[in-house]
Image: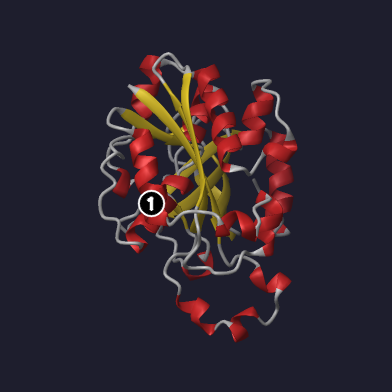
């Protein structure tokens, strides 16, 4: 079995009016685009089961949805118009990536966003067969669990934690990010443990972050109000409240007297269903008092 670590870079319209305030007035058709993130670069690294790198893959993808490169994307990735003009069509890039992945590989990425957008782009272009996508591992989730972190690790934090030397200017390049992710995977790979993180039903895994939470109605019956220590129900002293992309609540457990932070993130599956991801963690008294203040003043809570 091989592992193929992929990384993608996208072009989109996020914050486009910061650079061009009249953009939507001049490009009204952009409001109708059905693909929010168009893939413009693909990078991949293939590891064998001994965690040895055997192949690399990189290509730019010539855009056909967004004919203009968002300046924010260009600044972050270093990708320029001439890079994309020399790119290949998405259909050809997907076919090349499939040949690179091959028959006996598990596809991996740092968080589920890339794999979700790969499938959504394939749907947009009517590329119905991604035959090589037979199993998937979210390496962010795997790394966070293996390193026993309370919060999801970003790639840069994981690299620092594992003392992997990283050059800031190399990040946000698809092949470089895939290579750095592969280095993280090598350090924490365990043949037995990793099997529990392989997802087969990719369409129904929670993979798409909901960005417009203002129109989301929280269904409290889908939240899990239980103490992570003893499992007993907790009483929320500060009911769930929206903080940007997640709901936060603060409470306590009467059984073991723990102070609890409850976080609820709602994601969508590629099938369109909403999935509630509940995270409850124990706080010390200082943390609890600090978060009460942040809660009451609507300050960002991690």
Residue sitting nearer the eye, 27 or 152: 27
Which residue: 64% across, 45% down? 302
Q: Is residue 20 visible?
A: yes
Q: Where residue 194 appears, x then y in whole percent?
A: 39, 22
Q: Where residue 167 appears, x then y in whole percent?
A: 73, 32
Q: Where residue 115 appears, x then y in whole percent?
A: 42, 46
Hey, which residue is sitting farthest front in the picture? 86
Disc 1 secondary structure class: helix
Eyeballing the image, is 97 above or below 208?
above
Q: Where residue 16 appears, x then y in whole percent?
A: 65, 70
Q: Quadrant of residue 252?
A: top right
Q: Is residue 247 left or right of residue 134?
A: right
User: If the image is split into quadrants, where does the N terminus sit?
Assistant: top left
Which residue: 69% across, 37% down? 170
Residue sitting nearer the eye, 67 or 202: 67
The crowd level at tag 1 (other Cα within 10 Å; few <14, some 14-19, many 20+) is few
Residue sitting nearer the eye, 138 or 282: 138
Q: Is residue 153 left or right of residue 279?
A: right
Q: How many marks?
A: 1
Eyeballing the image, is 238 above or below 98?
below
Q: Is residue 221 visible?
A: no
Q: Which residue is mark 1?
A: 92
């Amino acid at each position: 079995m091989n592992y193929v670590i992929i990384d993608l870079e996208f072009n989109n319209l996020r914050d486009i009016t910061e650079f061009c305030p009249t953009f939507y007035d001049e490009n009204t058709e952009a409001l109708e685009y059905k693909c929010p993130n168009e893939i413009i670069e693909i990078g991949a690294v293939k590891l064998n089961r001994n965690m040895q790198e055997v192949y690399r893959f990189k290509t730019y993808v010539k855009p056909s949805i967004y004919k203009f490169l968002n300046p924010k994307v260009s600044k972050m990735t270093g990708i320029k118009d001439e890079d994309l003009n020399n790119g290949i069509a998405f259909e050809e890039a997907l076919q090349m990536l499939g040949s690179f992945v091959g028959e006996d590989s598990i596809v991996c990425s740092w968080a589920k966003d890339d794999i979700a957008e790969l499938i959504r782009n394939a749907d947009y272009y009517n590329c119905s067969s991604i035959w090589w996508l037979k199993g998937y591992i979210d390496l962010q989730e795997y790394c966070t669990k293996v390193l026993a972190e309370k919060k999801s690790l970003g790639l840069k934090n994981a690299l620092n934690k594992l003392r992997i030397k990283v050059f800031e200017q190399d990040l946000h390049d698809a092949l470089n990010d895939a290579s750095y992710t592969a280095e993280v995977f090598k350090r924490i790979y365990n043949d037995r443990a990793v099997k529990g993180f392989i997802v087969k039903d990719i369409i129904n895994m929670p993979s798409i972050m909901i960005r417009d939470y203002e129109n989301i109605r929280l269904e409290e019956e889908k939240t899990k109000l239980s103490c992570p220590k003893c499992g007993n129900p907790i009483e929320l002293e500060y009911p769930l409240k929206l903080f940007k992309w997640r709901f936060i609540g603060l409470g306590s457990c009467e059984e073991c007297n723990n102070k609890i932070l409850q976080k609820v993130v709602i994601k969508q599956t590629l099938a369109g269903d909403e999935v509630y991801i509940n995270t409850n963690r124990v706080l010390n008294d200082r943390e609890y008092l600090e978060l009460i203040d942040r809660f009451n003043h609507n300050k960002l809570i991690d």
